[in-house]
Image: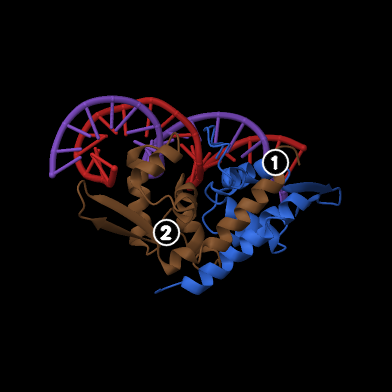
Chain colours: A blue, B brown, C purple, D red
Amino acid sequence: MATEQHLDDCPIQPVVDIISGKWTAYVLWEIYNGNNHYGGMVRALPGISTRTLSTRLKMLEQRGIITRTVFDTNPPTVAYQLTKKGTALAPILTSMKEWSERFRETD
Amino acid sequence: MATEQHLDDCPIQPVVDIISGKWTAYVLWEIYNGNNHYGGMVRALPGISTRTLSTRLKMLEQRGIITRTVFDTNPPTVAYQLTKKGTALAPILTSMKEWSERFRETD
DNA sequence: CCGGATCCCAGCGGATACTG
DNA sequence: CAGTATCCGCTGGGATCCGG
């Protein structure tokens, strides 16, 4: 992540910068599929640490991929949602899913 | 790469396992765009080390994404090409490109 | 429940030099 | 040209504890 390289000319650089980090794609997948809560993601992604999840969520928010909304219910709840920019990632995610289903196990 | 996690149920796991490594997506992009030679890729990807490129190419070959063909010309040349499995990644790459073009610079 | 802060370490991958 | 070998720095991220 945060390539810092002189690949600005490479036409896929922006998205690679975002999704190439470990766990990032999975986090996006969860949000894309309506799993909008921190705890839910922790449960859905066995193995991820809270630190990593926090880091990813913050990065995605900072880059305008997701929004973080706090509801002052009791106890307070937080919802993560895709922005338009984030929703536009859908074709990538779905084509990733299609490829994965097609080639899971033996080719 | 090589998740080893219990995310086998996650529908995008196979492809994430492949492209999430640093540089991997760029290497695939180059081959997809007809840059089939080792030296050409080194030149096209400023900052990549030969070690990393070798590792990535070997990994991609092992997973059946690309083939490695040696021509015994003088000097011998090597060509990397996408298999059918690799060509099937095209929708992912093109949607990555489209998103990147759309959101490069300010949103 | 939703995280932040800290500590720590394996391993990815960069630099460099060398081979066929 | 097309890699391999070695060495090692650096950072991603896991574990754990703490706070609102």
Q: Quadrant of the N terminus of chain A?
A: top right
Asked if one can make out residue B101 in the rendered structure from this viewpoint, the answer is yes
Dot 1: element: loop
Is A57 rendered above or below residue B7?
Answer: above
- Going by the numbered disc 1, the residue's amino acid type is Arg
Nearest the viewer among A73 and B70 is: B70
Instruction: Answer yes or no: are tags 1 and 2 on the same subunit.
Output: no
**In the picture provided, is A99 more to the left or to the right than B61?**
right
Dot 2: element: loop
Percent coordinates x, y for residue B79 in the rendering = 33, 54
Residue at the image point whose x is 53% and y is 61% from the top: B90
Mark 2, Cα crowd under 10 Å, few <14 / some 14-19 / many 20+, is few
Asked if one can make out residue B9 in the rendered structure from this viewpoint, the answer is no
Residue B4's tag is: 2
Residue at the image point whose x is 65% and y is 41% from the top: A59
Q: Label 1 marks which chain's residue?
A: A
- Going by the numbered disc 2, the residue's amino acid type is Glu
Is B21 rendered above or below residue B63?
Answer: above
Residue A6's tag is: none
Give the number of the mark in front: 1 or 2: 1
Q: CA distance from mark 1 to mark 2?
A: 29 Å
Mark 1, Cα crowd under 10 Å, few <14 / some 14-19 / many 20+, is some
Percent coordinates x, y for residue B92 in the rendering = 57, 60
Nearest the viewer among B100 and C6 is: B100
Is A95 rendered above or below residue B103?
Answer: below
Residue A63's tag is: 1
